[in-house]
Image: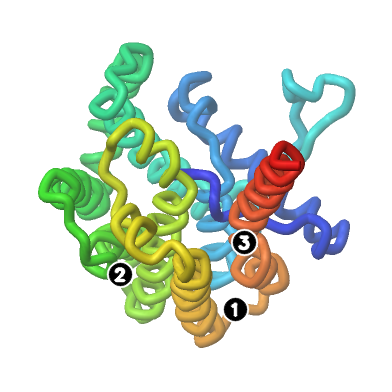
Amino acid sequence: MFGYININRNQLTKEDQKAYQSYYCGLCQKLRESCGTKGQMLLNYDMTFLIVLLTGLYEIEPKKQEFTCPIHPTRKQTAWTNEATDYAADMNLILGYHNLEDDWKDERAYTKKAFAKMLQKDYERIREKYGRQVKAVEDYMEKLALAEESREENLDVIAGLTGEMMGEIFDWKCDEWSEELHCLSFYLGKFIYLMDAYEDIEKDRKRKRYNPLSNMSDQCQEGFETFCRLMLTSMVSECARSFERLPILMHADILRNVLYSGVWFKYEYLQLKKKKQQEKKVKRGK
């Protein structure tokens, strides 16, 4: 369920690209500092968005440092870290842990189960610090499992579970910004769940696994793509509307880039892939 909240580099200035990458590197360094190499293996851009959002909202100046990265050893890299980085790193581990557990349940991937076991002590440490958020994720996993087991067909209900969980994750301080952060992340969470279901629909069909979009795809093939596009657009629009109500000036261009363009990167990639597959079928037919 990771990998949908990213930037569109082609539409960002060099300065903003550098800033975003520095926050991403900062998250990587913080995961290594708190959990070791195993923590770095959970690194994703989704939580980098959370860092930039909270940094901009609370106007937190980042601490800048240079370091040598094993993946890019030829020159020094720059990492930006602050309180939001510490928080996002902990949330990254909690979500990553449950993602591994979910993969174990779905695929019986023993490597994922072993990896989750390695994270257990760090998980318990974070649970003591952020009990509200961890409970929200645990409750979410239980409710999602029940909804999938009952083959829930109401998209608002099942996608809303992810939205509710994300609301607790994004609500860092339970302060005057809680309501708007909840609203923004609720629709962002729904978008993530629906985008994940959209991407996996063919794979789930082949494996005969539950997918909330399957029935709609089978019953209304001609209008299915249009419906999905409108549904995803609606979620992002609500998310962006909520963002615009927040008094964010710092890194606002980066955040708008993500919400207005970056979140569509995977969708556009899938459309291009489908187009090429269709062209191949036409050529074979000739």
Q: Nearer the viewer, residue 236 or 35?
A: 236
Q: Is residue 39 above or below residue 282?
A: above
Q: Position of residue 102 (x, y in %)?
A: 28, 33
Q: Nearer the viewer, residue 59 or 43?
A: 43
| Distance in Å between CA atoms under marks 3 and 1 | 22 Å
Disc 2 is placed on an element classified as loop
Q: Label 3 is placed on what type of residue?
A: Trp
- 130 left or right of 193? left
Q: Label 1 is placed on what type of residue?
A: Ile
Residue drawn where x is 56% and y is 55% of the image? 5
Q: Nearer the viewer, mark 3 or mark 2?
A: 3
The residue singled out by tag 3 in the image is: 264
Q: Is residue 84 above or below residue 203?
A: below
Among numbered discs 1 and 2, the one appearing first in the sequence:
2
The residue singled out by tag 1 in the image is: 248
Residue drawn where x is 47% and y is 70% of the image? 223
Disc 3 is placed on an element classified as helix
Circle 1 Cα neighbour tier, 10 Å, few/some/many (<14 / 14–19 / ≥20): some
Among numbered discs 3 and 2, the one appearing first in the sequence:
2
| Distance in Å between CA atoms under marks 3 and 2 | 30 Å
Q: Is residue 68 in sight in this rendering?
A: yes
Which quadrant of the view contains residue 71?
top right
Q: Position of residue 154 (x, y in %)?
A: 22, 66
The residue singled out by tag 2 in the image is: 174
The residue furthest bottom is: 245
Pointer 3 with pointer 2, Cβ within 8 A: no
| Distance in Å between CA atoms under marks 1 and 2 | 18 Å
Pointer 3 with pointer 1, Cβ within 8 A: no
Q: Quadrant of the C terminus?
A: top right
Q: Label 2 is placed on what type of residue?
A: Cys
Q: Nearer the viewer, residue 58 or 16?
A: 16
